[in-house]
Image (cartoon, rainbow, N blue to C red):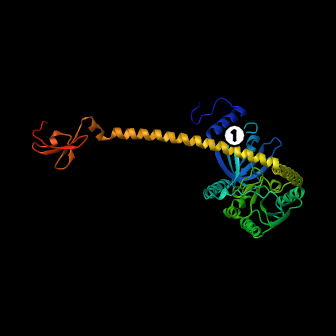
């Protein structure tokens, strides 16, 4: 090592110096977040993205490799303000430092996502997302709330005309992006609910960024969908897009085209359903006719004189069998009850305290209160007592007591 102010005696190659700078930068600067405007955005055929981030004073070159760029759900435009998360690296061949971007999102998107999650939790706690009414299997009229000028309505009409040309489409044009869009969507849902000829409502639009779709994340839109008396299908954006409207609706469709396919049955399927129903009805009628014919034949046979006599004989035999069984059961029951009664009599007689008097024992009572004497200490000498025998009583006087 050289001292402060000294010049190294050994010359460095450009590569060596560049690598020293690379190591110092890459090891010394942690992963950082950088805000700036996008400039010179290039989507290379390799799948990598190259662009510059700049502010009013400086700029830095950026690269987002293919395996990181697959997470992008928007296309950065010239001048768009973004937030980039990445690491400082040095491109040795060019001798330039650059930001290796790991994640890129429009500035403010993080705040939008936080607001979205907070509203989602609030409405879920209220039970607003528990609205899952079944869709009508064969709607005759479908209401649509979407923009008149976007591809979504064309896709819906195309699919429904192909699958079910017999279904009417009632379009209520509405703003689906920007200021006033949420209020217009809410009013569109209410307008369709005032009609009595609409079976199901599709609310939606085509794809876009979270900012473009934000009106479908507004609380008033979610509440209007949940309050609709007509089942609502949410068809916002592409398959990867989710909005609050999707959770509030009775059903979420990944795209407007998919919503049209879900809402109406293909005419060929409907025809097949009708054919199946007609076949089942015909089979049911034939089966019923055959069953009734068999019952008529059975009744006819039962009305013949021979059959009537046979039925009477069978009933008479059944009555005889029941009579015999009842007599036997009654006799057995009476015998069992007499046995039980005799046992009870013997038990009661054995428990009678006066039964022992017949064997020479007696019961002694104290004369003054007629209490049974069970202990010599209960009477005093000279006190009168009564002895109850098996036959008769004896009055006596205690001469002496022995404890």
Q: Secondary structure at mark 1?
A: strand
Q: Nearer the viewer, residue 399 or 20?
A: 399
Tell me the residue at 84%/61% (across/down).
153
Q: Position of residue 178 (x, y in %)?
A: 74, 63
Q: Nearer the viewer, residue 287 or 62?
A: 287
* Quadrant placement of the C terminus: top left
Left or right, residue 280 beside residue 401: right
Q: Position of residue 325 (x, y in %)?
A: 62, 41
Up-down relation of residue 379 to residue 165 (above or below): above
Inspect this view and state whether residue 8 appears: yes
Left or right, residue 55 beside residue 381: right
Asked where in the image residue 19 lies, by quadrant, the reply is top right
Asked where in the image residue 263 lies, by quadrant, the reply is bottom right
Up-down relation of residue 204 to residue 342 (above or below): below
Asked where in the image residue 195 lies, by quadrant, the reply is bottom right
Inspect this view and state whether residue 146 appears: no
Left or right, residue 130 beside residue 373: right
Q: Which residue is mark 1?
A: 89
* Quadrant placement of the N terminus: top right
Q: Nearer the viewer, residue 165 or 355?
A: 355
Q: Nearer the viewer, residue 22 or 267?
A: 267
Tell me the residue at 72%/33% (across/down).
15
Left or right, residue 59 beside residue 339: right
Q: Position of residue 152 (x, y in %)?
A: 82, 58
- Dot 1, crowdedness within 10 Å: few (<14), some or many (≥20)? many
Q: Residue furthest front?
A: 391
Count of marks overlaid on the render: 1
């Amino acid at each position: 090592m050289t001292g402060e102010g000294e010049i190294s005696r050994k010359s460095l190659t450009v590569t060596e110096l560049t690598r020293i700078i690379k190591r110092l930068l890459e090891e010394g600067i942690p992963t950082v977040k950088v805000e700036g405007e996008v400039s010179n955005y290039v989507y290379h055929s390799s799948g990598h993205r190259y662009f510059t981030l700049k502010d009013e004073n400086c700029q830095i070159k950026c690269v987002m490799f293919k395996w990181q760029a697959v997470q992008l759900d928007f296309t950065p435009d010239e001048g768009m303000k973004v937030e980039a998360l990445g690491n400082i690296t040095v491109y040795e061949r060019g001798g330039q430092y650059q930001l290796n971007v790991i994640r890129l999102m429009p500035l403010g998107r993080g705040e939008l996502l936080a607001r979205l999650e907070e509203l989602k939790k609030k409405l879920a706690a209220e039970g607003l997302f528990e609205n899952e009414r079944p869709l009508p299997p064969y709607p005759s009229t479908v209401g649509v709330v979407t923009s008149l000028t976007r591809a979504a309505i064309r896709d819906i009409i195309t699919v429904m005309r192909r699958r079910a040309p017999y279904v009417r489409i009632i379009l209520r044009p509405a703003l689906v992006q920007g200021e006033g869009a949420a209020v217009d969507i809410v009013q569109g849902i209410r307008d369709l609910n005032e009609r009595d000829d609409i079976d199901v409502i599709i609310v939606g639009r085509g794809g876009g960024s979270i900012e473009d779709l934000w009106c479908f994340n507004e609380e008033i839109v979610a509440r209007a969908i949940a309050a609709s008396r007509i089942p609502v299908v949410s068809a916002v954006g592409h398959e990867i897009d989710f909005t609050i409207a999707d959770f509030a609706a009775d059903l979420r469709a990944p795209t407007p085209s998919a919503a049209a396919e879900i809402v109406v049955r293909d005419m060929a399927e409907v025809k097949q359903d009708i054919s199946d129903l007609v076949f089942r009805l015909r089979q049911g009628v034939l089966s019923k006719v055959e069953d009734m014919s068999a019952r008529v034949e059975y009744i006819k046979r039962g009305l013949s004189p021979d059959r009537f006599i046979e039925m009477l004989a069978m009933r008479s035999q059944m009555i005889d069998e029941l009579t015999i069984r009842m007599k036997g059961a009654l006799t057995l029951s009476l015998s069992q009850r007499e046995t039980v009664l005799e046992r009870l009599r013997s038990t009661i007689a054995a428990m009678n305290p006066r039964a022992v008097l017949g064997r020479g024992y007696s019961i002694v009572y104290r004369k003054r209160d007629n209490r049974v004497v069970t202990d010599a200490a209960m009477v005093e000498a000279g006190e009168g007592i009564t002895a109850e025998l098996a036959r008769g009583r004896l009055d006596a006087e205690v001469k002496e007591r022995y404890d």
